[in-house]
Image: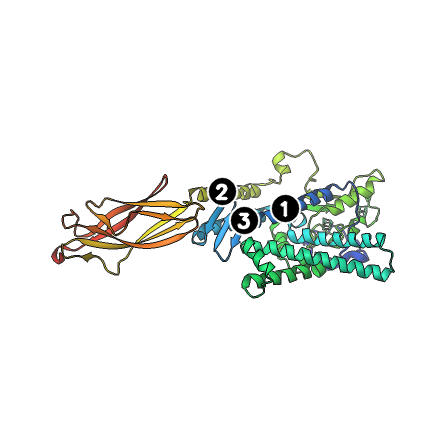
Amino acid sequence: MLTTENGAATNPRVDVTTRPLPECNRRLVRPPQGKGRAFHRLRKAIHFGCFLIFLVLPLSNLMRFDIPRQRFYFFGYELWISEFAIIFFSLMFLMFVITAMAMFYGRVYCGYLCPQMIFSEASIAVESRIRRWVNKYVNWKAAQRNLLARALFYLILGIASVVLAFVFIAYFVEPRDLLHRLLSLDVRTAGGVAGAATTLLTLLDFLFLRQHFCTVVCPYGYLQGMLGDDETLIVHYRDENRECIECQKCVRVCHMGIDIRTSPYQIECIHCGECIDACVDILARLGKQGLIHYAWGERGELLADQGTAWYQHMGVRDSKRVVVLLLVLCYAGGLFAALSMRRAVLVEVLPMRATLYRQDAQGAVYNRFRLKVANRSHQQQIVVLTIEGLPETSFVSFENRVVIGGGQSLEREFEIAAPPSAALSPGVNHFQLVSRVGNERDSIPETFIMPFKDSR
Ligand code: SF4
Ligand code: SF4
């Protein structure tokens, strides 16, 4: 991979300027607070919404993979591990949406939606606010104020790490169970150890790693570099008339410590748009337009341009994107169909062929079966079984009715008996076992073995 002078990875297709980079380029800096910054305010509103979603999804069972119970909760559906195909399909759909989003809109997921970025920026903002508050209201020596600010920051970050780790683990362990483990300071069970380890990692992450995580640990940034093309949304510096006043504000506000003027394809750039706001802000004072923009590729029009068709404005800019969009829609349709065709109660009947049949002294023939019922709903259900296509036969020591509680599964063995008078063929007789649950009816093809003529 090619790199810029400061070591940032670039796309070999572009290298728009050879301008030397400023000293502060590699530092992660805190953006100054400003008013009227459109993308900054948009990001903060989206960050807040994402934080609420992050909290609500596991705590309300909207999306959660309960490892101890082996259940996948997906927007009102409780999928059992035996329904792995649907679980896999759901996860693939989410992956596909994120991948398509990277192709259409570049790294907007990193800049606008990623929890790591949201909490990294939040920890920087909290640290800055505490420092300002202590400097304003505490009349101590500078070193003592500094110590107090750090202690307060560590305290708040410690509490926040416990909360965030709790919510994260709640995606995999039932929240009430997890709260019980937390309150009893459990570090013996797997859930307790996972909670303690996640808390520690969260604390260390937001103390030391922060946005470095994006370039050092996270593979998604590299993946997005491969998914983008000449029509993908990027943040691009365009200065044909040489209007840049070299104020460096776009560099100072950048959370990732890069200079967007060097290249629009630096691996660190998360397409957050903070540098766009900064340039607009500074050049507006001189009555000029900003020089940094969201643009559809290096040579494409700007996002703000009004002349394009609405679908192009939404990112559907070539046939490749039409195909990707259709695939996403097909996936969504397939997932919707699979979820709506899913039965709340799963009934399986398996013949037990260790012994083909049993015959009593009166000549009646018996075949043995195993019934498996899984109630994947939250309500009690009644399953009624009937025999169709096997005249004169009946269930033996089994009421054809099974009552099963919500979330329960059961197994039961039963026999079907054919009296000597039954008009069945020797050998294999095909019939249907019909299961009824409420208004749902299901036919299960089965076989009944009769003795062969010479053995009867
Ligand atoms: S260069 Fe601009 S868009 Fe890229 S990360 Fe820095 S501030 Fe955000
Ligand atoms: S903020 Fe705008 S004018 Fe200032 S250095 Fe960056 S691109 Fe140039």
Residue position marked by numbered label 2 in the rendering: 330
User: Residue at (55%, 41%) from the top-left corner?
Assistant: 322
Q: Residues within 10 Å of mark 1 (few under 14, many from 20)?
A: few
Amino acid at the residue labelled 1: Leu
Instruction: Check if mark 3's residue and mark 2's residue have beta carbons within 8 Å.
Output: no
Q: Residues within 10 Å of mark 3 (few under 14, many from 20)?
A: many
- Res. 52 mark: 1
Percent position (x, y) of residue 2?
69, 58
**Does dot 3 land on a helix, a strand or a loop?**
strand
Left/right placement of residue 263 relative to residue 172 reads: right
Query: Is ligand 1 within 8 Å of the beta carbon of the residue shown at mark 3?
Result: no
For marks 1 and 2 on the same chain, the one whose residue lies earlier in the sequence: 1
Q: Residues within 10 Å of mark 2 (few under 14, many from 20)?
A: few
Q: How many marks?
A: 3
Percent position (x, y) of residue 315?
62, 40
Along the viewing direction, whichever of 151 and 216 lies nearer the viewer? 151
Depth-wise, is mark 3 or mark 2 nearer the camera?
Answer: 3
For marks 3 and 2 on the same chain, the one whose residue lies earlier in the sequence: 3
User: Residue at (17%, 55%) from the top-left corner?
Assistant: 451
**Does dot 1 land on a helix, a strand or a loop?**
helix
Residue position marked by numbered label 3 in the rendering: 63
Left/right placement of residue 109 relative to residue 276 reads: left
- Res. 248 mark: none
Query: Is ligand 1 within 8 Å of the beta carbon of the residue shown at mark 2?
Result: no
Amino acid at the residue labelled 2: Cys
Instruction: Check if mark 1's residue and mark 2's residue have beta carbons within 8 Å.
Output: no
User: Residue at (71%, 60%) from the top-left corner?
Assistant: 207
